[in-house]
Amino acid sequence: AVYDRLDIFSEISTGIEAFLQRKGYSDVKKLIGLAHEMV
C-alpha cells in the first residue's frame, strides 16, 4: 500500500520545478517568507 506510488515524489518535484519556472523563481528558498510580505 505504501509502496504503490513511490513515483509520486518525482511528480511532486517536477511540479514544483514547473511552478517555479512559471513564476520566475530560480530557487524554492526564494519563496520562504513571501506570504508574510503580502500581509
Image (cartoon, rainbow, N blue to C red):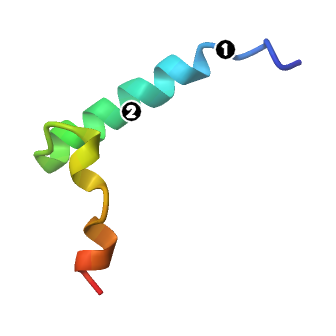
Q: Dot 1: what SS?
A: loop
Percent x, y for residue 15? Answer: 38, 33
Q: Nearer the viewer, residue 17 or 38?
A: 38
Q: Residue sitting at 15 percent across and 44 percent down?
A: 25
The residue wearing badge 1 is 6
Mark closest to the chain's N terminus, 1 or 2: 1
The quarter in which the N terminus is drawn is: top right
Percent x, y for residue 22? Answer: 17, 43
Against 8, residue 39 (above or below) is: below
Percent x, y for residue 14? Answer: 37, 25
- As drawn, the label of residue 14 is none
**Residue type, numbered disc 1:** Leu
Against 34, residue 2 (above or below) is: above
Horizontal placement of 33 versus 22: left or right?
right
Q: Residue sitting at 17 percent across and 49 percent down?
A: 23
Image mark count: 2
Q: Dot 2: what SS?
A: helix
**Residue type, numbered disc 2:** Gly
Horizontal placement of 12 versus 23: left or right?
right
Against 3, residue 14 (above or below) is: below
Q: Residue sitting at 55 percent across and 22 percent down?
A: 9
Local crowd at mark 1 within 10 Å, few (<14), some, or many (≥20)? Answer: few
Horizontal placement of 36 versus 7: left or right?
left
The residue wearing badge 2 is 15
The quarter in which the C terminus is drawn is: bottom left
Location of residue 6 by image quarter = top right
Residue found at the far bottom of this picture: 39
Q: CA distance from mark 1 to mark 2?
A: 15 Å
Say if mark 1 contacts mark 2, CB within 8 Å: no
Percent x, y for residue 3? Answer: 79, 12
